[in-house]
Image: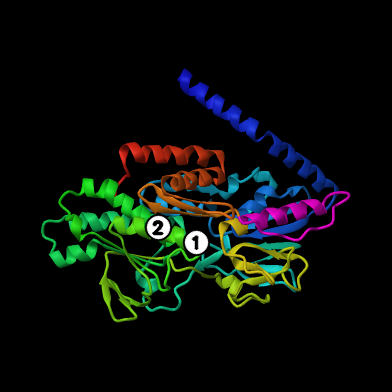
Amino acid sequence: MGLKNLIIRGRNYISDHLSKSSLENAMKRRQLRGREKNEKLIILGCGWGSYSFLKNLNTAKYDVVVISPRNHFLFTPLLTSSAVGTLEFRSIAEPVRTTRDINEFKYIQASVTSIDPNNNSLMVKSTFHNEKPFEMKYDKLVIGVGSRNNTFGIKGVEENANFLKELHHAREIRQKIIECFERASLPDISNEEREKLLSFVIVGGGATGVEFTSELNDFFNEDLSRLFPFVPVNDVKIILLEASGKILSTFDEKLVKKALVNFRNSGIDVRTHSSVKEVLKDHVVLNNGEKIPYGLLVWSTGIGQHPLVKNSPFEKDPHDRIIVDDHLQVKNYSNIFGFGDCANVEGKNYPPTAQVASQSAVYLAREFNNLEKINPSPPKPFVFKFLGLLAYTGNKSGILETNLFDLSGFIGFITWRSAYLTRLGSLRSKIQVPFDWTRTLIFGRDISSF
């Protein structure tokens, strides 16, 4: 009991020490509330943009409300690792309520169904019931709802494919992989059914599709092949389908070739110019008529817009993103702002990446903070700074592209892990993720099914 009490006291001391400054800020905020009426600032979403904005905003002059159906921030670059058990799910998720002192903002787990910018109001619907939406008013609105999976209207995708955008998607994929191998090892399974179960198809050759393919191949080579000795190795097929002529289209051609060499040496079947026509329950049909059976199909073909953004009255670009100016202000509305995948600066074509969302959110938070100063400095336009491109390509290899240099192979892999480790949202995650990597290296990935 003595040791347990000591640990608890130590944990509480550290927690109190770390939260001291935020507690002081909360007390200042309460004092300000008594003297003047704060503006009501509503933030929509809790992805890269909204999370970064909330962390960097000085909340003393605002009544901040965060509305999101998801109650955590998700470190999406490592989602593919959690889908195969390299990392545990909670290691890459950060609860919204722990972003900063909970007295400095209010969180509502709900979805916004519509925006009325002329009356400064939102219609909000709880994620816990199907009752009539309720109205909420705002003085300022920040839109960072992100994006959705893009199915391109292809028949059968919604019903049969697995997406990889949220934690529950990763959990479903991990369970499906294990189920396929367990079923394939049954003694009464037919050869045809076994071959189908052991065929894993990934549609989309962007960063997410390539990294999941790499993680899946590592999972098979390092763990599944050892733990399922009676599953024929030659029956396992990993197929990556890309509609265009090149995977990792944003990367330099030389780095892409290195990734392809690594894939082919691993036995991964990479097929470019392979567009999907239809997805059925047990096979995918290509435009050329070829049918590919699968046990698991993962769909990762880019992003589509959130229904809220699509149906909003704001002016949008050809990709249905809300048009904002270089101060991230929504066109024609001085009290509404947008960033991330759901918005784009007019005249620019910034990629829908975590880099852009995070940088634009930090910029906007600083601009908000600047306006609250006694002598604010003149506002500066947002300028995106390209920090580089990273991708994991399997077998402890990665690729990195920057404006100054490129890296590949094992050093690229170390850089990939190091870069993401420094970008994790909290100290807790920065401890848990290396722990998970070490555990996987020593003991392998967990294949429990529950």
Give the quarter of the image for residue 297: bottom left
Q: Position of residue 328 (x, y in %)?
A: 71, 64
In percent of width and height, residue 95 lies at 55, 48
Which residue is pictured at 16% across the width and 56% down the height?
232
* Coordinates of residue 111 in the picture (x, y in percent): 57, 64
Element marked by disc 1: loop
The residue beneath circle 1 is 251
- Name the quarter where the N terminus is drawn: top left
Marks 1 & 2, CB-CB < 8 Å contact: yes
| Circle 2 residues within 10 Å: few <14, some 14–19, many ≥20 | many
* Left or right: 253 in relation to 201: right
Magenta stretch bounds: 358-386
Residue drawn at x 35%, y 58% is: 261
Q: Is residue 223 left or right of residue 27?
A: left
Q: In the rendering, which numbered label is found on residue 259? A: 2
Q: Is residue 163 above or below residue 217?
A: below
